[in-house]
Image (cartoon, grey):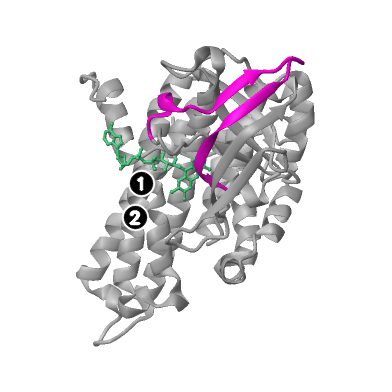
Amino acid sequence: MTDTMFSESEERAALREAVAKLAGSYGRAYVAEKMNSGDKLTELWQDMGKHGFLGVNIPEEYGGGGGGMGDLSAVLEESAAAGAPLLMMVVSPAIVGSIIARCGTEEQKQRWLPSIADGSLISAFAITEPDAGSNSHQITTTATKDANGGWVLNGRKVFISGVDEADTILVVSRTADAKTGKLKPALFMMPTDVDGLEYQHIPMDFQAPEKQFSLFIDDVHLPADALVGDEDGGLWQLFAGLNPERIMGAAFSNGMARYALDRAVEYAKTRQVWKDAIGTHQGIAHPLAKVKIELEQSRLLMQKAAALYDAGDDMGAGEFANMAKYAGGEIACNALDVAVQTHGGNGLATEYGLGNMLVAARLGRIAPVSREMILNFVAMHSLGLPKSY
Ligand SMILES: Cc1cc2nc3c(=O)[nH]c(=O)nc-3n(C[C@H](O)[C@H](O)[C@H](O)COP(=O)(O)OP(=O)(O)OC[C@H]3O[C@@H](n4cnc5c(N)ncnc54)[C@H](O)[C@@H]3O)c2cc1C
């Protein structure tokens, strides 16, 4: 009997093909034009939403496709491989959509999920703080109950993506009753135009349509139903979104690596400075072959992590989502480095866009969880070594 466990379903393959076609019709030229003009990828985002691609993971009864992270990560990987990665997919449908679908009330699901699924609403996600960084247990953004049963939020966040294009931000805070010690996250949907919220753009050393921001949250009043999940619900509520975030981080990186490899192979086949094309030389061919092998390893890890998450195995998904994110970050950096080298001087020419992407690929080693923190996690949880931090 043939074992088909390592092939995706025909439905998934068709989804990939449809996304590749749509995103490919926009392509890298469209993204480059938007980056230069300072605009967002609005047309592509809306088109992807109209075709149901942004909400493939959202339950059908709330306007989504009824699939899972396997489907959503395939969508992001294909759009990134076409040169048009949609960073806000990592945040809006994957983190926020997953958390609301799993932890929200019936009213919250009806209110938020259909517009997240069709892309008409974008939600950012804010956990990182200036003085906490990788150590989320250290966050100090505080939610205090007011006299009317609502909440007052105070705190600072950094590196929050897409605030300028988002309608809401899912903010991770802690309640005044659980101000110190191990994090008991309290999650709030906060409108981006609410009184008391200010945000400031953080200039970054790579060009991308999505920008990062510092948030200043000063006495922001939110109604009782802004709280998503239990105020004391424990870390699993957060990880209902963070495991999808890691799987999507891997998808973003794997897609970017595919894009870089395709460009490099194309160039290696056509560029000729001696008798034959440069791809004839093993000095060029072997690094490309190595990227191909490591990319396929990385994609398998991502698919396994998504399959575990979709099967409801949160523990297994946690371990493999971390490993998949690690592998994705590594292969995106390696693939871009090899692509730049293959292109010689053109590798750093603005026209080819690879130098900018090489810096952007570094993001996969830093966010949403750094390479070092993943190694800490694997050493401790997968290998049983002593906790190092
Ligand atoms: C482009 C971009 C987009 C982002 N978007 C978002 C977003 O939308 N929402 C959001 O909430 N956050 C976002 N982030 C933040 C991101 O998740 C953090 O940058 C990341 O978690 C690392 O935190 P830090 O930058 O504070 O680094 P730090 O925690 O200060 O770490 C600095 C270095 O020290 C290492 N280190 C720290 N502790 C240890 C340890 N115990 N052992 C070994 N090494 C250690 C880290 O690995 C890292 O290399 C984004 C970041 C970037 C760059």
Q: Amino acid at mark 2?
A: Cys
Which quarter of the rendered picture does the C terminus lie within? top left
**Which residue in the structure is indicated by mark 1?**
365
Q: Is residue 152 magenta?
A: yes
Q: Nearer the viewer, residue 73 or 148?
A: 148
Does the beta carbon at disc 2 come under 8 Å from ligand 1? no
Q: Nearer the viewer, residue 246 or 14?
A: 246
Q: Nearer the viewer, residue 147 or 338?
A: 147
Q: Residue at x 30, y 21 (%)?
A: 381
Position of residue 280 relative to residue 170, above or below, is below
**What SS does tag 1 mark?**
helix
Give yes or no for contact between labels 1 and 2 (Cβ–Cβ under 8 Å): yes
Which circle marks residue 298 in the picture? none
Q: How many marks?
A: 2
Residue 295 position in % (x across, y down): 36, 50
Residue 15 position in % (x across, y down): 62, 47
Asked whether the viewer can see residue 222, the reply is yes
Stretch of the chain drawn in magenta: 134-161
Which quarter of the rendered picture does the N terminus lie within? top left
**What SS does tag 2 mark?**
helix
Q: Is residue 113 magenta?
A: no
Which circle marks residue 333 in the picture? 2
Q: Residue at x 39, y 30 (%)?
A: 320
Instruction: Work out how far the residue at label 1 is from the one at label 2, CA to CA, in angstroms.
Output: 8 Å
Of callouts 1 and 2, which one flags the residue occurring earlier in the amino acid sequence? 2
Residue 335 position in % (x across, y down): 34, 58
